[in-house]
Amino acid sequence: MTGESRAQGFPALWGEIAEIGRTAGGGYLRYALTEPDLTLRDWFRIQAHRRDMPVTDDGNGNLFAWWGDQWGRGAVLTGSHFDSVPHGGGYDGPLGIVSGFLAVDRLRAAGHAPRSPLAVVAFAEEEGGRFGLPCLGSRLLAGAIEPAVAAALTDRDGVTFGEALGGLPAGPLPGLKDRVKALVELHIEQGRQLEVPVGVASAIWPHGRWRFDFTGHGDHAGTTRMADRRDPMLTFAYTVLAANEEARLTGAHATMARVEAEPNATNAIPSLVRGWLDARAADPATMDALVEVVVKRATERAGRDGTEVVVTPESLSAEVTFDTALAGRIAELLGGAPILPTGAGHDAGVLSAHVPTAMLFVRNPTGISHSPAEHAEDADCEAGVEALATVLGELT
Amino acid sequence: MTGESRAQGFPALWGEIAEIGRTAGGGYLRYALTEPDLTLRDWFRIQAHRRDMPVTDDGNGNLFAWWGDQWGRGAVLTGSHFDSVPHGGGYDGPLGIVSGFLAVDRLRAAGHAPRSPLAVVAFAEEEGGRFGLPCLGSRLLAGAIEPAVAAALTDRDGVTFGEALGGLPAGPLPGLKDRVKALVELHIEQGRQLEVPVGVASAIWPHGRWRFDFTGHGDHAGTTRMADRRDPMLTFAYTVLAANEEARLTGAHATMARVEAEPNATNAIPSLVRGWLDARAADPATMDALVEVVVKRATERAGRDGTEVVVTPESLSAEVTFDTALAGRIAELLGGAPILPTGAGHDAGVLSAHVPTAMLFVRNPTGISHSPAEHAEDADCEAGVEALATVLGELT
């Protein structure tokens, strides 16, 4: 493959979406099925149309642009998601979709004649930033969540996923295993682990989200004696620090990054503080033990604070080991690309339980992600496109 | 004074406003100059009209219903505020206004002929729940804040106080000291200090609000190594616990009840966490020392977390000692009512620097305030009206 006959390089196509959903702070607000995401989905349809790739919608919010038979046997999928965490970076997700279209361009420019159908995919609500459950689109496609359950998930304004989608999700695609022979998701790397432009994923750490509802007694902050208080903010604060300590002790990752207090007024002791724990580890036993200790410490502290804590798991993603043979074959194809695990969840992780799945990572020089400072160099993104085209050419 | 000729008892008049701004959880959303507060202000005008009391507006959002010359020399004011903390109780504020109108009824029924003008007052934005600065209306009336500064204060939606008011506040009333010879504010007690129906205030603890901006590095919660993090939620959590500890050690009150995180997403380490400290103590030295230690401990912890903290005082209310002679005279009038201090700020506290000021407290059986559970018995509220009528009758 050479660059000579390329219609468009990475920076030009990337530039088309760079301002969609961008905020003054440089980060993105691209919540699933809100206006910026809908604009990106329109852009997807335009890109597909330009390339004579018919678009199908699986009824779960996921879009597919086809080169070859739609849902023919043994298709190869490539793509990622458009939605962002609030004020996140622009690469996490969209890089995989843009790279998919550019890889198609390269294959065509090189005269590739695919023997299998190939689709560029845009998965819906991967971050869980709007409806709370990450990888919602891929979970529905894979049958990993009931359509009615997904439809009832609500955003912060009380809008349900079903309302945003315009109806009940279609649910799993019949015969998914036969129809798809491989999924290759390209994604920006999110640690600081990759020292060459492109790597291959080995595994995703098991991870999950737990909601902690700390309840106490709402009261006047000025007049209530310290000894009479039942202040759930104290229990929350203790739990934030406990989660951090336990993660450091066990080599796991634990974060409490989201908080809501009621009434959230300066002069009123809260009646309720809600905090969310994000926990991940290299193996499920470590993660489970971590969460257990954090819950235990929170409960003990609640006893001392006169508060109560109720813990609700909101999502759980089992450990994913990507198809080892496929990862090895890809690494070899790419001239010995490094194979590395990640702590981040992905649609490819959800689908790996159903179809052979692989991921390509593009170098992230600072490791920063879920932040406006997330960045990849154009040259590394070009190398990612090149690698993806090579892999898709081999698989189709 | 007897109850025989009363047009209306406490429960009937109280019932007229009980549902205004009430939420499903039983608490009230009566932010200053929002729809529920405007409805209460209309109700105030109707009550005044029913009693042939002309209403004046001082241009600062404060309403006055007059019995006698408007702003004549040596007027006596009584009243409180309509606005609530979010999801607060119904008594904190409105009890003083309702009791003011009922006291006028009792004085008239008893044939009282006032020698001085008397006004029932509704002060604006006492809680600071909407624009962040408590006692905004009384501060403006007293000249304790520049009108332009008050006008520029913004609510959470970016609406300024000036916009909500419909223009620049009028500022201090010329000749306030000559025009007002006494202010008597009746209020529900907010501790658990009063064992008889009615008491008299001696003092208000010095108190203030400080905003803590904790900044760190936004990053991916799943992939960022614990050692590489600069997570401001940790510094916030530590500061919450430190403020509580220091208050317990010094006999002061300290609360961090309001928090905002950015981006406030489960899977993104925040770049910014904002927390507000409410601190109060029996004397200014104790309060200042408390805040100093909390800031010091927060700053030290920020050094360990790799974060930064900037502290901004948002309001400061000096210690208030109410007019000792007036309090003694009132306590005696009421047959030896107890005299007690409070940790809560009040419009009467602001005005006490300018005119002789007193407060009556109505018993609060649980001490709970700033919560839907705030409550006073009807019989105690009736006793409050009776006491207020006695005091106003004596003063006018």
Image (spheres, coloured by chain):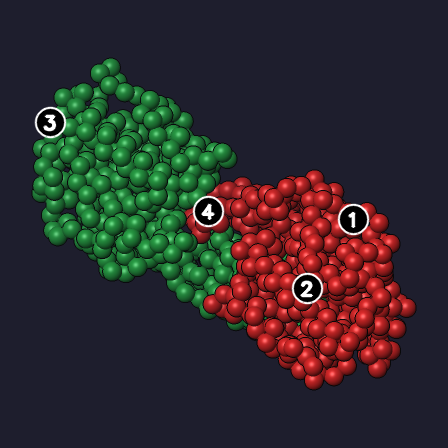
Chain colours: A red, B green
Q: Mark 2 lies on which chain?
A: A
Task: Give the residue number, with chain letter if any, for mark 1.
Answer: A173
Task: Give how far across and how far down residue A141 sits, in percent.
Answer: 75, 51
For residue B381, what is the image quadrant? Answer: top left
Q: How crowded is mark 1: few (under 14 residues within 10 Å), some or many (20 or more)?
A: some
Select label 3 or label 4 by which is in front.
4
Select label 2 or label 3 by which is in front.
2
- Going by the numbered disc 2, the residue's amino acid type is Asp
- Going by the numbered disc 1, the residue's amino acid type is Leu
Whether tag 4 and tag 2 are in contact, CB under 8 A, the answer is no
Q: Residue at x 25, y 60 (%)?
A: B148
Task: Give the residue number, with chain letter if any, for mark 2.
Answer: A52
Up-down relation of residue A205 to residue A151 (above or below): below
- Going by the numbered disc 3, the residue's amino acid type is Ala
- Going by the numbered disc 4, the residue's amino acid type is Ala
B320 sits to left or right of B325: right
Camera-side residue of B233 and B160:
B160
What distance separates the C-alpha of mark 2 from that of mark 3? 92 Å
Q: Which chain carries label 1?
A: A
What distance separates the C-alpha of mark 3 from that of mark 4? 42 Å
Give the quadrant of the N terminus of chain B: top left
Select label 2 or label 1 by which is in front.
2
- Asked if badge 3 and badge 4 are on a common chain, one would say no
Q: Mark 4 lies on which chain?
A: A
